[in-house]
Image (cartoon, coloured by chain):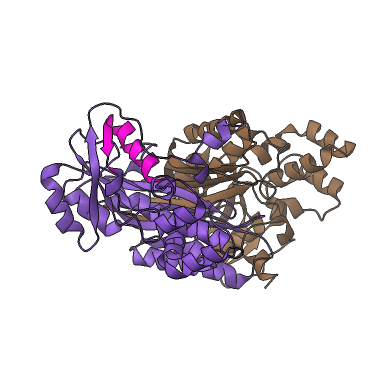
Chain colours: A brown, B purple
Amino acid sequence: MVLGPGDDAAAVRIGDATALATADILLEGVHFEIGLSTPADVGWKAMAVNVSDIAAMGGVPRFALVSLGAPATTAIRTLTRIYEGLDECARACGVAVVGGDTVRADGLIVSVAAIGEPGDAGIVTRGGARPGDLICVTGSVGGAAAGLALLHAAWNDERAALLLERYPKLAALHRRPTPRVREGLAAARAGATAMIDISDGLGVDLGHICKASKAGHSMELEQIPIADGVEATEAWAGVAPGSFVLSGGDDYELIIAIPPNRLDELHRALAPTPVTRIGEFTDGDVPLQGVVDRSLDPKGWDHFEEQA
Amino acid sequence: MVLGPGDDAAAVRIGDATALATADILLEGVHFEIGLSTPADVGWKAMAVNVSDIAAMGGVPRFALVSLGAPATTAIRTLTRIYEGLDECARACGVAVVGGDTVRADGLIVSVAAIGEPGDAGIVTRGGARPGDLICVTGSVGGAAAGLALLHAAWNDERAALLLERYPKLAALHRRPTPRVREGLAAARAGATAMIDISDGLGVDLGHICKASKAGHSMELEQIPIADGVEATEAWAGVAPGSFVLSGGDDYELIIAIPPNRLDELHRALAPTPVTRIGEFTDGDVPLQGVVDRSLDPKGWDHFEEQA
């Protein structure tokens, strides 16, 4: 094994080659709700979150396995549309679905494993950020969580419905995140020293880089690129400003650590995708700033440990 | 891609190497029931069924990804034991668990993806059996299904409880199937032309080889090696003789197609594991013999199609 559990994807030796491998599962009622996304959206997202893990290693996603669980009452057309969504995202990312499993289940389960290859600049882990490296983020954050909150509420809350109409991209950011495959590869070539995708939230995921890199960080909250409509949604929800931005998660943007002298190169390499400097890594431990609300994140062992 | 969906595992190109990849999901209430297996048993089985798919290709299993879903009320100790069972089977088969996912779910979900390498004799698919090749099977069949039926009934049925006491291996065959990794590799070296593992049932899985190989078969029912206690269990259950043997499934023994002149070599290569000739492949289509009861098999699209 080249790189075991604890990064976005594992790196393993297969014959004379290195493969990147990752698995993520999407559950009805936990990661998506019927009615808030179409079956094709659910398929797209299940593929996207796995592909994103390969992208966050600077890798090239190649193959995927799909295990689908669904109630016996599920219409064939619904299953077909889930597979179409999986396949649509897979094709967009150069991935072939090569196998898997279909089982009867109480609720919808979409379990995907993705396999890729390292990019030509090699693997970028979470652990290579050095003090002085800049913290950059692709695109904008907070939109997926804001979109989900609005979708949840819109049926019964006219203000939420109006916000969804005014900021239609928010729903799309929740339903169909775009894995940053090209950007991950380009960032690796531009000299990225560490990367992670934002699944748990900017605060938590930046913390993962800090922990793996044994670095602190100084993040400038006001520099964070916020998706249009997120601040209005935070105001509507009555949550602290920055809640969706820092701990919403599900954005699948990349956090990139880059030496200051490579920042221009990073901008050029990722264009036209915007990449924003939001702070720098420091020597030693700096506690996470801002609101980190784990209740927005159903993943991880924390929720089991509370019960123990 | 070297070999896509439709075999036990997919074969894909990674760099200059070929990888075998497969995924299977185990669900509470579908593939196992709490109370009939320990948490460690459930973990063992989830790993075993995936490793078995690599073994059925004549491959060497190497790595696994595990996505575990569990209710929030699940004790940490229970989760730990599931992982211990997964790891125990993985170690026994030379597999390293390199990543995965943990999520909150309504019921227990154990989703595993396994990655392996082709063995030194290459990949053995389902599609290479030729008319005249012998049909062989490792070990004995029917035991897992008989064990499950008895475990289901034993709490309220004294005869079932007595059968479990008299044939204690039946419960173990359901709970902790042994993937035939060494046997799959050895069979490939001995000249196997096609292989599959018995997950759906001897009848259905032999049918998969026939379909992929465009061959018929002449199976001699009386030659099938039946696990001790299966016939007594069939009598107790009041089902047709051969029901558990042909359609019980979950045995994870290998069905091997072998040219007649390689049979002795196959016996030597697999020893001390018994391998039994149960018939031969023929020219053209021969309908499956015996009772093929799909109601014992919760897998596959059939159950969705019934609803369509």
Front-most of residues B216 and B290: B290
Q: Relative to A232, is B232 on the left or the right?
A: left
Taking the view exactly as shown, the residue that stands out farthest to the top is B284
Point out the image quarter for the C terminus of chain A: bottom right
Q: Position of residue A234 (x, y in %)?
A: 81, 48
Q: Position of residue A48 (x, y in %)?
A: 55, 41
Residue B58 appears in view: no
Is-magenta flag for residue B209?
yes
Q: Which residues are magenta?
A: B201-220
Q: Residue at x 43, y 58 (%)?
A: B232
Quadrant assignment, res A307: bottom right
Number of numbered discs overlaid on the protein picture: 0
Q: Residue at x 72, y 53 (%)?
A: A222
Q: Main secondary structure of the magenta part?
A: helix
Above or below, comparing residue B88 to residue A231 in the picture: below
Front-most of residues A251 and A269: A251
Above or below, comparing residue B6 to residue A49 in the picture: above
Q: Position of residue B43 (x, y in %)?
A: 49, 63
Q: Position of residue B137 (x, y in %)?
A: 28, 50
Point out the image quarter for the N terminus of chain A: bottom left
Is-magenta flag for residue A24?
no
Q: Relative to B134, is B47 on the left or the right?
A: right
Q: Relative to A258, is A78 on the left or the right?
A: right
Front-most of residues A244 and B125: B125
Residue B23 appears in view: yes
